[in-house]
Image: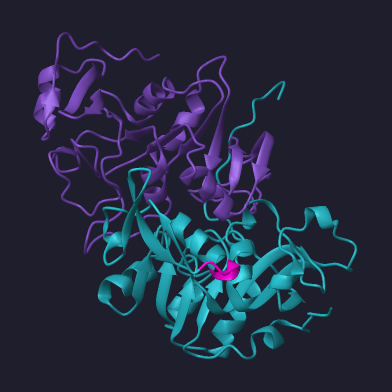
Amino acid sequence: MNKLVANVQEAVQDIESGMTLMLGGFGLCGIPENCIAALVEKGSKDLTCISNNAGVDDFGLGLLLQKKQIKKMISSYVGENDEFERQMLSGELEVDLIPQGSLAARCQAGGSGIPAFFTPAGYGTEVAFGKEVRYFNGKPHILEHALTADFAIVKAWKGDRYGNLLFKGTARNFNPLMAMAGKITIAEVEELVEPGELDPNTIHTPGIFVQRIFQGEKYEKRIEQRTTRERLTVND
Amino acid sequence: MLDKKGIAKRIAQELRHNWYVNLGIGIPTLIANYIPEGIDVEFQSENGILGMGPFPFEGEEDADMINAGKQTITPMPGASIFDSATSFAMIRGQHIQLTVLGAMEVADNGDIANWKIPGRMVKGMGGAMDLVASADNIIVAMMHTNKRGESKLLRQCTLPLTGVKCVKKIVTNLAVLDITPQGFKLIERAPGVSVEEIKNATEGRLIVEGDIPEMKID
């Protein structure tokens, strides 16, 4: 098994304008920084991006938004990005805001052969508009469909040439789910290791879901809200 | 009346030993600072951590360890990390004993609106719809009136809904109220606040029975 590609340019070379992409990350945590930069450079346009958030104005998906490369976003929360809100309110950008749990489940379903499922989230709200409602245990649920993408772009802590991935901390979030749901999944990793170095018990995403993997570089890992607490002086 | 910390302190009194708790962004996150003596709770953060702990010391911030509000945090001993589908399985599967979140409007039947002001603020619902649709025990933490002095406790929500008939209890800067089939029921007054003040600030149906005690907060 050798899913290694030489670099990010090779990884994204056949991503074309008009395609649907999934991008992992929660806020700026666990985002595929190298692939996003490569897409900005490539100039692919009219993209539909499925990602929980939209980055901030000058980092993450915000970079693609700034260059007007995104036609449509499917996300659960876009509050950190003023440019996003502006483009959305002005009608330049099409937006589907969907509940975070439904987004997660729809990506997982997309990679799992489950075409649709019922969830209580969003019942009675505008999210339910046009969707079938069914009662289970006396409680209303709405029908949601699976999400898939031409390319899923994920970011991991460690990976090997089999495509096995291990994530770190809360940088995991949507990455394992989106990895399942891409027709082609690209993984950028902080540390590329030899097969056998990752203990099989610790692998979060089995390599079967990943088609391309490369060693990422120069991760900024920007922190959105650097919150700290004070040290107590003497005995802490 | 109470400030944000006071509201958080009062809601912290509702925590019970061994509960799993989800705290929304804003006022609810302050609740973690006031856990009553002698009880253990575990905080779940929707982005994939159970056992969320305090902010790190300066210089020890980890970009890969954040909460739902994108703030840097630390894990408690016994914490666990998981993906977003597992996180929402905990939430939707009713494994969490208490959900606390903010709101723009709450109706007297328990409807809640906290994610969109059409044409003005459309940040998105994040995990709020999953949380309110699934949780048995939902407490709303909010100011009783908005910046224009209008009541946020209404007969009917005017803003797009996050969930229907789901709120159980509200704690505001003026009062503690339960949601009943007959509307808002006044349970406690904030220190120094009169029943009259609360009536004037509440647009929805308000039931006041008997003597209403004052909140007991340190």
Q: Which chain is cyan?
A: A
Residue lying at 54% horizontally and 35% vertically, measured from the top left: B43
Describe residue A214's horizontal placement relative to residue B94 as left or right.
right
Describe residue B80's horizontal placement relative to residue B188 as left or right.
right
Count of numbered tags: 0
Which residue is at the front of the view, B32 or A222?
Answer: B32
| Residue A160 position (above or below residue B9) | below
Q: Does the magenta-highlighted stretch encompass residue B98?
A: no
Quadrant of res B147: top left
| Residue B165 point in image, percent of width and height | 26, 40
| Residue B138 position (above or below residue B209) | below
Report whether residue B57 is seen.
no
Q: Which chain is purple?
A: B
| Residue B141 point in image, percent of width and height | 33, 34
Which residue is at the front of the view, B19 or A219?
Answer: B19
Quadrant of res B2: top left
Quadrant of the drawing holding the C terminus of chain B? top left
Which residue is at the front of the view, A155 or B162?
Answer: B162
Magenta range: A110-114
Which residue is at the front of the view, B91 or B160?
Answer: B91
| Residue A109 position (above or below residue B31) | below
Residue lying at 69% horizontally and 82% vertically, measured from the top left: A8
Quadrant of res A182: bottom right
Please identify the residue farthest to the top as the structure is shown: B211
Q: Does the magenta-highlighted stretch encompass residue A113?
A: yes
| Residue A7 point in image, percent of width and height | 74, 83
The chief SS type of the magenta part is helix
Quadrant of the drawing holding the N terminus of chain B? top left
| Residue B78 position (above or below residue A66) | above
| Residue B67 point in image, percent of width and height | 54, 46
Report whether residue A155 is seen.
yes
